[in-house]
Image (cartoon, grey):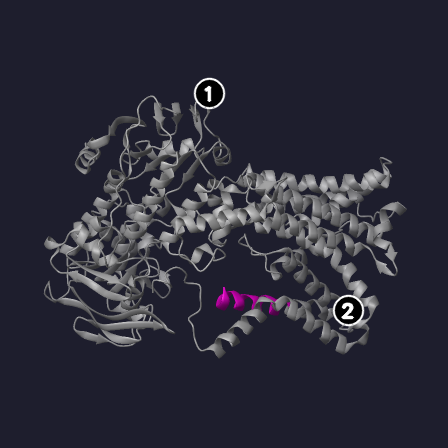
Amino acid sequence: MSNSSATLSGSPPGSGKSTTGRNVLAWVLHNVVWIWLVALVVLFGLFNQFFFTVFNLQNVMVQATVLGMLGLAVALPLMVAEIDLSIPANLGFSSAIGALAYSELGLPWFLAMLVGVGVGTLIGFFNGLCITKLRMVSLIQTLAMMIILEGALLAITQGRTITNLSDGYVWIGQATVGGWPIMPVVFIAAIVVVGIMLRRTVLGRSIYAVGGNATAANSAGIRVDRVKIAAFTIAGCLAGLGGFLLASWQMAITSSQGSSYLLYAIAAPIIGGISVFGGRGNVIGVLGGVLLLTVIQVGLAIVNVPSFYVGMIGGFMIFIAVAIDAIRVRYFG
Amino acid sequence: MSLQSSQSEKGDVVLRVEDLGRTYGAVIALQNVTLDIQRGTIHGLLGENGAGKSTLVGLISGQRKPTSGTIYLNGKPIEHADVKSMEHAGVFLVTQEPMIVDHLDAAENLMLGIWPSSKGFVNWRTLRADAARMLEGTGIDPRMRADKLDAVARRKLNILRAMFSGGNVIILDEPTTSLDADDRTELFGFMRRLKAEGVTFIFISHYNDEILEICDAVSVLRDSRLAGGTKDMSTMTSEALSELVLGRGLDLFQRKRQDFGVESARIEIRDVAAQGVRLEALDLHPGEIVGFTGLPGSGAKELARALFGLIPSSSGSISLGGTQGTRLPGHPTEAFDRGIAFLSDDRRRDGLVGQMSIDQNLSLSSLSRLSKLNFIDFGEIRSISARYFELMGIKAPGGDVQVDTLSGGNQQKVCLGRVMATEPRLLILDEPTRGIDVGVKQDVLRIIDDLASRGVAVVIVSTDIDEICRSVDRVCVFAGGDVVEEITGADITNQRLRQRQTA
């Protein structure tokens, strides 16, 4: 007993065989997002050979890019045990500002793009300030911010779609190298950068500590408020970048740009293992969640499911993924 | 107080466990435990973390099923014991974490889940009347919101709740954790009153003095077995209890006291004003261990927190190592940077990040020191973590074990390791040995002693007088936010400090 007093985490040693079986099951459940992803790819492929084509793979990657930027952005506030619902609205609004800076102020497209990303970053920073310094509840504060930004976008566009974007601005959304779209490279770069930030920097470890136990983090010498503000600010920056990518890809900014992404942008990181209670998860998980949701969307479109059923079936698939994950947490911690 | 008075005589056996055992796979958690608990007594249960106390209590309260043996209640064997049937029979477990809903008032908390009702509607009049009757004479206002109640009132509320549900054997799992001396006395008085009414208590504690003070009988568990016990507390001593707990004589730590002359004054604290603190001057010496004592609100704890920047100070300066005095730190980050480290008295709340590993917790306060351009030097981190893992004698399979799964004593060692890893010049420890068993306590005191011998000034804030006596060079007694008396050398005695505290 003196040994087991040191740690209570180990499962009781049973016979070798059942332990192995249990380990396999634990491994399967831990990687359920990836297994589910592979299973769905195979399933969709069996329904329609087109799913396995290079063209479709490229399509999935491009579709995953914008959702991925949003998913990463949503993940950061979640990791410090807060939430930012305004991120998809931020994406739409900041890209419209960027477009206006080009068309109204006559800035070069690159500067105009930076203005857009800057506005997104500032909105994230402002959200962080409200939540830390004013102690506003992030769920409601960012809900209000979402409504404000969606309304502002509608007001700016007057309900019309912005299409007068410069060639340079839309380049990244259209360009290909050897037939492969280059837009996904931005998402991959973002994953690498955020991943390194979380794993290797003081800020990253502080984010995990603050999300795990904010009081303990504070007395451990971590400035909790600053860490939270940083998480929101980076999230805003990612939303701004996502806004640029979406506008560039679609070559247009609608009066409700981004708002349809809200629920998927929140679902993706959570499916990927980011805890809503903070302190848990990593970028690879977010990538898995994003790819899973994208494959479901694209796959359902390709296998010719009548559009009236797409939402429902997609919802069921997400539900199954989350239910399996809940079972994993219940039995394997 | 409406207690279902039992028909049976006081002094007979209310609960008997016979040859009780429990295994988990190949792990033996409890083995051949036989003991009798007399009605209307307070029965102490003592043992190191992992000795089998929780298992025994879990079996008695029906949370787990025994793999062998029988539990008798009022002479009848209990079959298929689960929590519901044990509670029905009157056995209740009151855990460390008070099960209280903060935004409901005391009366409703008392009745939570057992609301008097008809057809699904709560009968508020009966609820209020019953609650008022139960709370009479306990000093708890039935209308008071639970989050406004103090710690001792919350403990009482849980005990009353168990009684109102028909409980007459109540198991208290470390009920004195985070209570100060006064609250503890009050809780003990409350328990004695209920005992006189025929309630039986099983009382789990880490503290010998508590067991000696309140228990009528004691049983000690060691390595999953009953190590011994007595039904006659008059012959029991603290040393004998420790020996039963450890299975060997306890090598009580005793510091070789040193006298630091005025000459070597190095750390000067001046004119501190903060919530609850109004201190003129205090000098500390490198290598010295100073004890801070005082009643709650006397300023001892508050000064400790202000020095570390955990509570804001409106004025005050500190100079470390002969330099010009500078403003007290405004935030723990600044304190660590300047060589001031602090260990909180509540490790679960603000000492550890439970879901992180031992290594990650050990290095948490040193991250910025161990990084270049904000990028962490993982090699450094690994070597620092390994060093403090070793130095603190943490018992775990490895540094990657999640801190949540460690025992209390090991968690405390991780906390202490974390603050020591910042290599402070002034280390402030708030109740460093609270809630850890007596063997680990000595380890912790030795580590602190060793640290001081390497030139670190250490402050220990403690309400444990025995411990203060054995581990410090000088005692500062606090009252009204300032040091009112300093005791040094041979004058530091148990008696003197006790006198001082009650005065």
Say which residue appears at 63% left-offset and 60% top-offset: A285
Q: Main secondary structure of the magenta part?
A: helix
Mark on residue B324?
1
> In the drawing, does residue A125 fall left or right of residue B344?
right
Q: Position of residue B422 (x, y in %)?
A: 48, 39
Residue A305, relative to residue A254: is it above or below? Answer: below
Residue type (three-letter) at the residue carrying disc 1? Gln
Q: Secondary structure at mark 1?
A: loop
SS type, badge 2: helix
Q: Residue at x 19, y 57 (%)?
A: B2
Give the residue pinned by disc 2: A301
* Residue B22 in which image quadrant: bottom left
- Can the viewer see residue B149 in this picture? no
**C-alpha distance separating marks 2 and 1:** 73 Å
Q: Residues within 10 Å of mark 1 (few under 14, many from 20)?
A: few
Chain bearing tag 2 is A
